[in-house]
Image: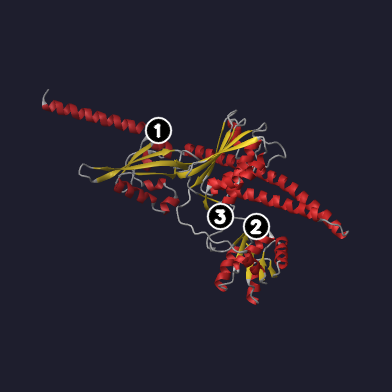
């Protein structure tokens, strides 16, 4: 075969290959594949472009490709920017709305690739457009269904939560209202009503405890995090724990000789541990053994509740009947309980879970049918810093402080709470002014005389107690303010050094807070 015949054969093969490729591109109907010149004018048009965009070749070839874009995109100069990005970066890809010949819109996936000559000169662009409207609609329908499902689940959870709270508070309010009504009648008749008042106080305390559980569950309870020795804490609770479970159950402890301190709220940790021990007791109605143990462990993100780092794991293990997988999954759901009607609020484990999460740790439950249950408290280690113990205040100092008569401005938008706070202050020997809003408090301060102290609620409309404290610090620096709130989260801008009084508070807690604020 001569060289001329060989070259002719290669040329024919190349022409045939190019023709096959041209027919392939022109025959594709699922993709709009066409060419643009360097300025963006259409130079070729395949069957897919005709089907998707609605133009015949003679209607579109020679016209600028920007007419496929929406007015919004053209206003943002997207067609020109698309070509610039393709030319500079070697590719442009994006999803967005495009316009057909009949001006209807479709959601498109667009790819633009630059075409260059052998010397690198830009000679045009290859543009591929795919109509993915149905895919986008399916995705939107799926996301909408997921949102609706989430909303339904959220409403179900809210219904369970409010129903449980309403049930428990109804019982407490019945005790309080009933006791106070009878106490009022006895008082008018000159009879002793101490027992009824005590009953109302106990009901109110139970209501406060329920509120604290709800705050712990929602992770909005104020925690006093400090280094805690777990072994010492458990040892100090020995009598309380044994008294809570009765003589038919034995408590066994297992702690290493050296265990690092953890960062926790000691009081809340005691409450959490007591809850777990009581749960373990209830899981063994015929008696058994509860094992309390602790150890230092390093965990990775996949091990326990997305934790990572070094922790102390404090566990409570019982040898009861255990839980099946379905019950274990629901165990930390609010108001879920296996103890029967009236025997449990179903807030114990959610409270513990909230406390652990708020303190940077986690609650983990391990159980199997017939294999008992182990509840684990994963507690972060305390920072190793030297702590200087503050000497306790002497009773004589406290009594001397309490004898000082103060002029106190009490602020609260709830008239009942405000009246109660004023009565407490006056009963302590102080003189009390009152304001029903932060704005009214500022007017009183402007009019004078100035009080020695301001005690304000935080959650108030228009201006919060925290904002009032900030304004007082600006206008009257040096005037002490106590912020009363049941929540741990105070918005930014409020000084972290501001004295706090946790709601609901007793008279003794108010007295202590007042004495501390003016010392």
| Residue located 55% across and 47% down the image | 232
In the foreground, 25 or 474: 474
Q: Would you place residue 23 above or below residue 223 in this image?
A: above
Marked residue nearer the N-terminal end (1 or 3): 1
- For residue 278, which quarter of the picture? top right
Marked residue nearer the N-terminal end (2 or 1): 1
Rounded to the nearest angstrom, the CA distance separating label 1 from label 3 is: 68 Å
Image quadrant holding the N terminus, namely top left
- Residue at the far top in the pictured view: 1
Rounded to the nearest angstrom, the CA distance separating label 3 from label 2 is: 15 Å
| Horizontal side of residue 87 vs 373, given as left or right | left
Q: For numbered disc 2, what is the local secondary structure? A: loop
- What is the crowding at mark 1: few (fewer than 14 residues within 10 Å), some, or many (at least 20)? some
- For residue 2, which quarter of the picture? top left
Q: Would you place residue 234 above or below residue 491 in this image?
A: above
Marked residue nearer the N-terminal end (3 or 2): 3
| Residue located 41% across and 45% down the image | 68
- Residue at the far right in the pictured view: 189
Which mark, residue 29? 1
Q: How many marks?
A: 3
> Percent position (x, y) of residue 173?
75, 50
| Horizontal side of residue 461 vs 195, given as left or right | left
In the foreground, 517 or 478: 517
Rounded to the nearest angstrom, the CA distance separating label 2 from label 1 is: 70 Å
Q: What residue is pinned by disc 2?
A: 503
> Percent position (x, y) of residue 250?
62, 36
Which mark, residue 224? 3
Q: For numbered disc 1, what is the local secondary structure? A: loop
Q: Would you place residue 106 above or below residue 413 in this image?
A: above
Q: Which circle, 3 or 2, is nearer the viewer?
A: 3
- For residue 441, which quarter of the picture? bottom right
In the foreground, 293 or 423: 293
């Amino acid at each position: 075969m001569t060289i001329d015949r060989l070259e002719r054969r290669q040329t024919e093969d190349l022409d045939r290959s190019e023709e096959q490729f041209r027919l392939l591109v022109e025959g594709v109907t699922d993709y709009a594949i066409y060419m643009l010149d360097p300025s963006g004018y259409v130079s070729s048009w395949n069957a897919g472009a005709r089907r998707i965009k609605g133009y015949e070749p003679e209607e579109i070839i020679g016209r600028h490709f920007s007419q496929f874009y929406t007015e919004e995109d053209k206003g943002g100069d997207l067609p020109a920017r698309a070509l610039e990005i393709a030319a500079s970066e070697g590719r442009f890809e994006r999803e967005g709305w495009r316009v057909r010949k009949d001006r209807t819109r479709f959601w498109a996936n667009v790819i633009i690739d630059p075409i260059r000559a052998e010397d690198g000169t830009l000679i045009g662009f290859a543009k591929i457009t795919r109509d993915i409207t149905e895919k986008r609609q399916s995705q939107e329908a799926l996301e909408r269904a997921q949102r609706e499902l989430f909303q339904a689940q959220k409403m179900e959870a809210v219904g369970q939560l409010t129903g449980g709270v309403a049930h428990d508070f109804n019982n407490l309010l019945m005790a309080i209202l009933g006791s106070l009504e009878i106490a009022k009648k006895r008082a008018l008749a000159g009879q002793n009503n101490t027992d009824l008042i005590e009953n109302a106080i106990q009901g109110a305390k139970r209501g406060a405890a329920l509120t604290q559980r709800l705050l712990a569950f929602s992770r909005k309870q104020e925690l006093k995090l400090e280094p805690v020795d777990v072994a010492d804490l458990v040892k100090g609770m020995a009598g309380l724990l044994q008294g809570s479970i009765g003589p038919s159950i034995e408590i066994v402890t297992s702690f290493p000789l050296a265990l690092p301190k953890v960062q926790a709220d000691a009081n809340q940790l005691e409450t959490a541990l007591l809850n777990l021990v009581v749960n373990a007791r209830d899981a063994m109605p015929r008696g058994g053994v509860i094992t309390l143990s602790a150890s230092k462990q390093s965990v990775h993100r996949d091990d326990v509740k997305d934790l990572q780092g070094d922790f102390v794991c404090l566990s409570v293990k019982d040898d009861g009947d255990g839980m099946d997988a379905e019950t274990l999954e629901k165990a930390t759901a609010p108001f879920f309980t296996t103890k029967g009607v009236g025997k449990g609020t179903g807030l114990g484990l959610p409270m513990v879970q909230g406390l652990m999460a708020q303190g940077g740790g986690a609650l983990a439950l391990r159980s199997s049918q017939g294999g008992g249950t182990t509840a684990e408290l994963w507690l972060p280690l305390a920072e190793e810093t030297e702590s200087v113990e503050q000497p306790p205040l002497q009773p004589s100092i406290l009594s001397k402080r309490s004898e000082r008569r103060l002029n106190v401005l009490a602020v609260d938008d709830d008239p009942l709470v405000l009246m109660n706070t004023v009565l407490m202050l006056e009963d302590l020997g102080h003189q009390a002014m009152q304001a029903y809003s932060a704005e009214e408090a500022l007017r009183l301060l402007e009019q004078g005389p100035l009080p020695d102290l301001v005690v304000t609620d935080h959650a108030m409309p228009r201006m919060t107690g925290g904002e009032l404290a900030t304004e007082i610090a600006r206008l009257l620096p040096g005037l002490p303010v106590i912020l009363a709130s049941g929540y741990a989260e105070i918005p930014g801008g409020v000084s972290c050094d501001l004295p706090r009084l946790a709601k609901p508070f007793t008279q003794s807690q108010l007295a202590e807070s007042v004495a501390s604020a003016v010392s």
